[in-house]
């Protein structure tokens, strides 16, 4: 059985419906990416999965449990972690304090010394800034902190919303290399929303194209990357 199954999902903001009968599946241990132009509902999709939108209709089944109607904090406790656009760290807390908050969602309710050491191994800049307030970090360091905090929660599924946004190419490569390592070594399952189609498709196993709130194409990421129509019409490759 898939880790996440979405069927006929309709969601939006108040009377404005953004998603129209969206369906997708995510297998355990896989990386799935959702691509498409700006304003097509990608962020809305992640918010709906996280229980952040009222009036959502359809089916969302995560690890055998229906998420529809559940509060965001309850969904997070089930093992679904959401790293939103804009990093989402606590700016007044230090790096170490932000990590401690993230670890509260882990099955044992905290992080071991080995867990923290692993995070600092993956993200060396965070080790150097562990006593600094998150709001004083660079954009790249804040994105690293957001990912690190989510990872310490030991999620079954991580939702990543535009992790490359506003970052220098070198930082983007560093962040995606860490994600590749965690996926390969720890079997992390990811749903990735990303404007950088090339890097997203190079990392993903399967891809969906979302256009005006509807899934207009899907398939193995390698096939979509090589489809000339998809490349020109949706991905700007």
Image (cartoon, rainbow, N blue to C red):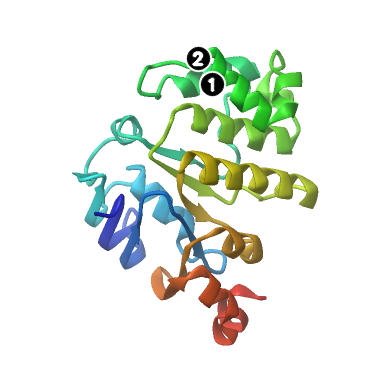
**Residue placed most toward the observer, 225 or 51:** 225
Q: Residue at x 58, y 74 (%)?
A: 225
* Residue 225 appears in view: yes
Q: Position of residue 222 (x, y in %)?
A: 54, 72
Q: Are marks 2 and 1 in contact (CB under 8 Å)?
A: yes
Q: Residue visible at 65% across and 35% down?
A: 144
Q: From the image, tell me which residue sits under label 2.
A: 112
The answer to whether residue 93 is seen in the rendering is no
From what the image shows, is residue 96 above or below residue 8?
above
Label disc, if present, on residue 1 of the rendered structure: none
Q: Which residue is mark 1?
A: 115
Query: How far from the left and from the top, in percent, is residue 179?
Result: 59, 44
* Cα separation between marks 2 and 1: 5 Å
Q: Residues within 10 Å of mark 1 (few under 14, many from 20)?
A: some
Which residue is nearer to you in this view: 219 or 21? 219
Q: Position of residue 160 (x, y in %)?
A: 51, 47
* 57 relative to 88 in the view: left or right: left
Query: Would residue 34 be found to the left or right of residue 162 on screen?
Result: left
Depth check: give the residue in front, 26 or 168.
26
């Amino acid at each position: 059985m898939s880790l996440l199954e979405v069927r006929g999902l309709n969601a939006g903001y108040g009377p404005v419906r953004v998603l129209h009968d969206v369906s997708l599946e995510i297998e355990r241990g896989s990386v799935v990416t959702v691509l498409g132009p700006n304003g097509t509902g990608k962020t809305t999709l992640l918010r709906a999965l996280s229980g952040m939108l009222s009036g959502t209709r359809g089916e969302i089944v995560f690890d055998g449990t229906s998420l529809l109607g559940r509060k965001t904090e309850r969904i997070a406790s089930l093992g679904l972690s959401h790293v939103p656009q804009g990093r989402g760290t606590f700016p007044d807390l230090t790096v170490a304090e932000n990590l401690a908050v993230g670890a509260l969602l882990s099955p044992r309710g905290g992080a071991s010394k080995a867990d923290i050491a692993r995070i600092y191994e993956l993200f060396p800049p965070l080790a150097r800034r562990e006593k600094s307030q998150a709001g004083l970090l660079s954009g790249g360091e804040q994105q690293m902190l957001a990912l690190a905090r989510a990872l310490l929660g030991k999620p079954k599924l991580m939702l990543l919303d535009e992790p490359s946004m506003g970052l220098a190419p070198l930082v983007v490569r560093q962040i995606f290399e860490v994600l590749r390592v965690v996926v390969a070594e720890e079997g992390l399952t990811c749903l990735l929303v990303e404007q950088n189609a090339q890097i997203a498709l190079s990392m993903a196993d399967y891809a969906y194209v979302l256009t005006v709130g509807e899934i207009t194409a899907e398939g193995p990421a390698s096939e979509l990357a090589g489809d000339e129509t998809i490349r020109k019409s949706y991905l700007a490759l």
